[in-house]
Image: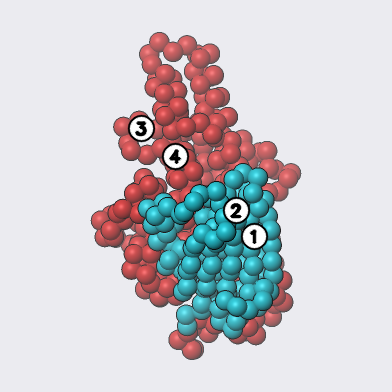
Chain colours: A red, B cyan
Amino acid sequence: MLSPGAVNALIVELRAPDVTESRADEIKSEIVAGHQGLIRHFIRLRDPQIYEDLVQIGTIGVLAAIDKFDLDRNVSFGTFASEYIKGELSHFYRDDGTIRISRSVQSHLGQIRTAQDAFVTQNNAQPSFTELENCVNLNRGEIFNALQANYSTHYSSLSDPDLHIDVADSRNEYDFIDEWESVRPAIDLLTPLDRKILGMRFIEQKKQGEIANELNMNQMAVSRRLTAILEQLRHEVDAE
Amino acid sequence: MTKSPEISLCVPNQAEYLRVIRQIAMVVGAKADLTLEALDEGQLASDEAANILMKFAQPDDVLYFDWSVQPGSLHLRSRTRCLLPELPDLPETLEYAWVIIQAITSELDIFLKDGQVHVNLTVTSAR
């Protein structure tokens, strides 16, 4: 992976008026090659038949990021490009539709979610694993698989209604200071909903169930968003 | 934290093993009959513990994990070799990761003993 300084220098050179076409191509190739690890990180569903196609789609995201990257913003190129890579992959997942969790796992996730919601409504408490297991007609392995799928679908869930929950963009609502300084650029890039969830969980110290209740979401959706958010923060640290 | 391990794991100090660590944490957490939220946070805490160990380990070191359970609680004892004579200021070194691991654990103990850094933690279902 190229250092943020090295990428910035290459982009400055790329945008110089006297750069030749061949040098411009070289620079773009170098930046793309330097972000292969990042692209591959975002390819969560490792279907070997289309894996290399997904790498190419991720590459389109990096190229778009090269065009749009604002050198004056206090954000590393890696963080900025992550959004474009995820965006391109999400478009593919949505438009092409060839990469999906199997119908059975989707159905299992739906059953778990419904059972969990019903339990919370009835008991005003989150179910334990055994209580949940007793409410769904699934074996333990099927539940594990579904939960794993829940954590790994955060980049391909554009149809997820939770992503469209509207919260006010109160950028200064939480004190993301001191300990959060190294990941501040990544926090700034989060959606208002994700920033809200991060603040509620780690500044207000609310449990996922409480957050879900306040935002009218399901606990599993909060969990999925938190997993995605923390991965983004870790990327920021790794990119430094 | 005195219960004998439900499962033990040793892995090379490489990020690609984080997925294995998370999956084992989920399976062991289910044996503790955690809620889904605690199950999720047990995975996250195990992941963060591994990341902390990785900060102090050398590239060819091995990371050791012992998970044990009690009803409603998942315990992790983890360790690796550490060449430092003493641990640095943890909140300053770990930054946001310190905030996260503190928020999701009910017990957390990070210490240096006999040339090894230890990360011991407990995640409990809050219902």
Label 1 residue SS = strand
Q: Which mark is residue B81?
A: 2
Closer to the camera, B114 or B110? B114
Same-chain status of marks 4 and 1: no
Viewer-side label of 3, 4:
4
Residue A57 image offset from top left, x and y in percent: 59, 38
The residue shown at (60%, 53%) is B81
Label 3, residues with CA under 10 Å away: few <14, some 14-19, many ≥20: some
**Label 1 marks which chain's residue?**
B
The residue shown at (60%, 56%) is B80
Q: Which mark is residue A70?
A: 3
Label 2, residues with CA under 10 Å away: few <14, some 14-19, many ≥20: many
Look at the picture and state if A58 lies above or below A164. above
Label 3 residue SS = loop
Q: CA distance from mark 2 to mark 4?
A: 25 Å
Viewer-side label of 4, 1:
1
Visible residue check, residue A193: no
Residue B63 image offset from top left, x and y in percent: 63, 56
Q: CA distance from mark 3 to mark 4?
A: 17 Å
Residue to which mark 1 is pinned: B64
Kind of residue sitting beneath label 4: Glu
Q: In terms of image quadrants, where is residue A185? A: top left
Kind of residue sitting beneath label 2: Arg
